[in-house]
Structures are given as structure tokens and as C-alpha cells.
Image (cartoon, helix red, strand yellow):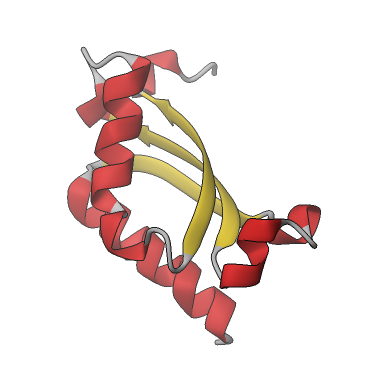
Amino acid sequence: MNANQQRIAAFDQDLRKAFQTQSLVIEDESHLHAGHVGAASGGGHFRLEIVASDFKGLNLVARHRAVYAALNRHIPKEIHALTIIALTPDEVST
């Protein structure tokens, strides 16, 4: 497992500790931001899609705050930017 895979595995572990996830996908999009000032610090750009019943009754801002809290130890050193899609199981189209 390379360093980036280890980083993503750590994010995955922290999110699964914080939420009862039905699904979780984390993608490294750093390559799309090459040359960006934030990329120079070593922090990457990530996109995550998480489906968890924990988000029920929470608005978008509260959901994002919860995700940031779960990943707090990784920000800003490992995570420079994060795109979050946080849904409840009921919100996932089947």
C-alpha cells in the first residue's frame, strides 16, 4: 500500500468510526489541482460520497461540519480541500 492509499485508508477508518456508513467512497482528485498553491503544502484534494443514517434530520451545513469533525486530525496537513456529498439512505436514488 503506497502513502496515498494509506492516507485514504486512514480517512475511511475515521469516517467509519464516526458514522454508521451504508456506503463510502473517497477519491483523490489532487491531480486535477496540480500547481495549485494548496497542493504545495502536501495537502490533497479529495472527494467523498458518504451515505449514513446519522445525517437524518441534519441540514447540509451540519452534515459537512460532522464530516469535517470526523476528519479533523487530517486537516490541513493531509487534506487541503474536500468535496463532500453526504446523504441519508432515504436520499439515495435506487
Whether 18 is drawn above or below 78: the answer is above
Left or right for 83, reference 39: left
Q: Give x and y (percent) for residue 81.
A: 54, 48
Whether 37 is drawn above or below 56: the answer is below
Quarter occupied by residue 12: bottom left
Foreground of the two, 42 or 83: 42
Q: How many marks?
A: 0
Q: Give x and y (percent) for residue 87.
A: 40, 24
Foreground of the two, 80 or 11: 80
Q: Give x and y (percent) for residue 1.
A: 55, 87
Left or right for 55, reference 35: left
Quarter occupied by residue 86: top left
Residue drawn at x 54%, y 16% is 93
Residue drawn at x 42%, y 38% is 50
Residue drawn at x 48%, y 20% is 92
Q: Give x and y (percent) for residue 17.
A: 20, 56
Left or right for 67, reference 80: left
* Quarter that holds the C terminus: top right
Residue drawn at x 28%, y 63% is 73
Left or right for 26, reference 91: right
